[in-house]
Image (cartoon, rainbow, N blue to C red):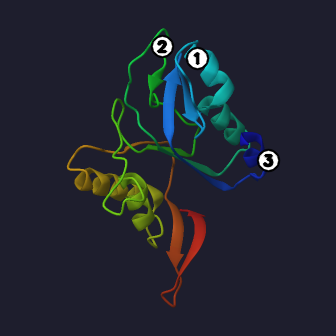
Amino acid sequence: MIDTFAATIQHDDLVLFYFAGHGKQSRDSNYLLPSDYDFDYRGCEHNYIINNAINVKYLMKKIDGKKCRVTIYLFDCCRKRIRIRATNAKQGLSPMNGSPQTLIVYACAPDSAVQDETRNNRNGSFIENLLKHITRPDKHIEKIMKDVADAVHLQTGGFQLPHRLSSISGKVFLVLNNNQGKAYLIFQLD
């Protein structure tokens, strides 16, 4: 699945990778858990994770190898530690560093959980606010992500605060207005 996705990426593309679900860290590596992840705690979870989850280092290496102009990773998953049994696996994602021109956004801070559903009973607070802000014209992506983080923090009463790491130089705009006041989707690095 990751190889297929990476094969579609062209040099100088803007890549936006979004994952919603559960994440875990095991032996200092981060893993994204598929919806059918079903470890029964009778064996070694690290071996199960290696064979049944997506290694984030592998994902980032495949994408970074394409020499994208800008890469944005949005990880909408918990980063809270859970009870550990005979393994050093932890729930959530540990901090990661991206290559140059990379923005990594976590739905919550380290050792924190996400609020599962909002009043619309459909989405978590991160994606609900991301959908409200990401298509705002003439706003650079870091301003959008700051506004998303502020809105999530307010909406959850301080329970959840998205965390951002960026090495993007310049401003990245996803949507710009044209002279007639109509918004259009574009990627522009200012």
Mark in front: 2 vs 3: 2
Q: Which residue is mark 3?
A: 7
x and y percentages locating residue 155 in the rendered image: 25, 56
Inter-mark Cα distance, 2 to 1: 8 Å
Q: Amino acid at mark 3?
A: Ala
Q: Earlier in the sequence, mark 2 or mark 1?
A: 1
- The residue pinned by badge 2 equals 88
Answer above or below: position of 92 versus 87.
below
Q: Are marks 3 and 1 in contact (CB under 8 Å)?
A: no
- For disc 1, the marked residue is 46
Q: Is residue 13 above or below residue 32?
A: below
Give, as a three-letter code, the residue at label 2: Asn
As measured in the structure, the alpha-carbon distance from the residue carrying label 3 to the one carrying label 1 is: 28 Å
Is the residue marked by circle 3 packed among few (<14), some (14-19), or many (20+) residues within 10 Å? few
Label 3 SS: helix
Which badge, 3 or 1, comes first in the chain's sequence?
3
